[in-house]
Image (cartoon, rainbow, N blue to C red):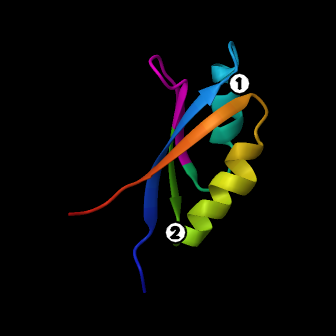
Amino acid sequence: MSDIVHAYILIQTEVGKAASVAEEIALISGVTLAEDVTGPYDVIVRAEAANVDELGRLVVAKVQGVSGITRTLTCPVVHI
């Protein structure tokens, strides 16, 4: 049995869309935190999934489907 996979998803949005994107993403199953931030990314999301494949489906099928997103970067958490 494998450990749950955690990741941070860094999101760039259209101008003025960060707050609404964060609110919508926060409602997605598997998302544990979604906050709008300042800097090169507009929203940072913490997500979890049973495995890497499920994480990929979460990002591609659900997160990237949210209107207003222009780019995502998924950063899986590693335990070294």
Task: Say above or below: 15 vs 61.
Answer: above
Outermost residue on the top side: it is 16
28 or 72, which lies in front? 72
* Residue 24 rendering spot, x and y as whole percentages: 71, 35
Query: Is 21 left, or right, of 55 in this rendering?
Result: right
Residue 11 falls in image quadrant: top right
**First to last magenta residue range:** 32-44
Amino acid type at circle 2 is Val
Q: Is residue 29 visible?
A: no
**Residues packed near mark 2 inside 10 Å, few (<14), some (14 to 19) or many (20 plus):** some
User: Which residue is at a point 73% across and 51% down the rendered structure image?
Assistant: 62
Q: Residue at x 68, y 31 (%)?
A: 70
CA–CA distance between discs 2 and 1? 27 Å
Residue shown at the point (52%, 69%) measured from the top left: 52
Above or below 74: residue 13 = above
Q: Nearer the viewer, mark 2 or mark 1?
A: 2
Which of the 4 quarters of the picture holds residue 56? bottom right
Residue density around tag 1, few if under 14, some if 14–19, many if 20 or more, within 10 Å: some
Q: Which residue is mark 2?
A: 52
Q: Is residue 33 magenta?
A: yes
Which quadrant does the N terminus fall into? bottom left
Number of labels in the image equals: 2
Looking at this rendering, what residue extends furthest in the bottom direction? 1
The answer to whether residue 42 is visible is yes
Residue 32: horizontal and vertical position, in percent? 52, 48
Q: Amino acid at mark 1?
A: Ser
Instruction: Please provide percent x and percent y for residue 51.
Output: 51, 72
22 left or right of 79 in image? right
Disc on res. 20: 1
Secondary structure of residue under mark 2:
helix
Q: Is residue 76 above or below residue 9?
A: below
Residue 42 found in image quarter: top right
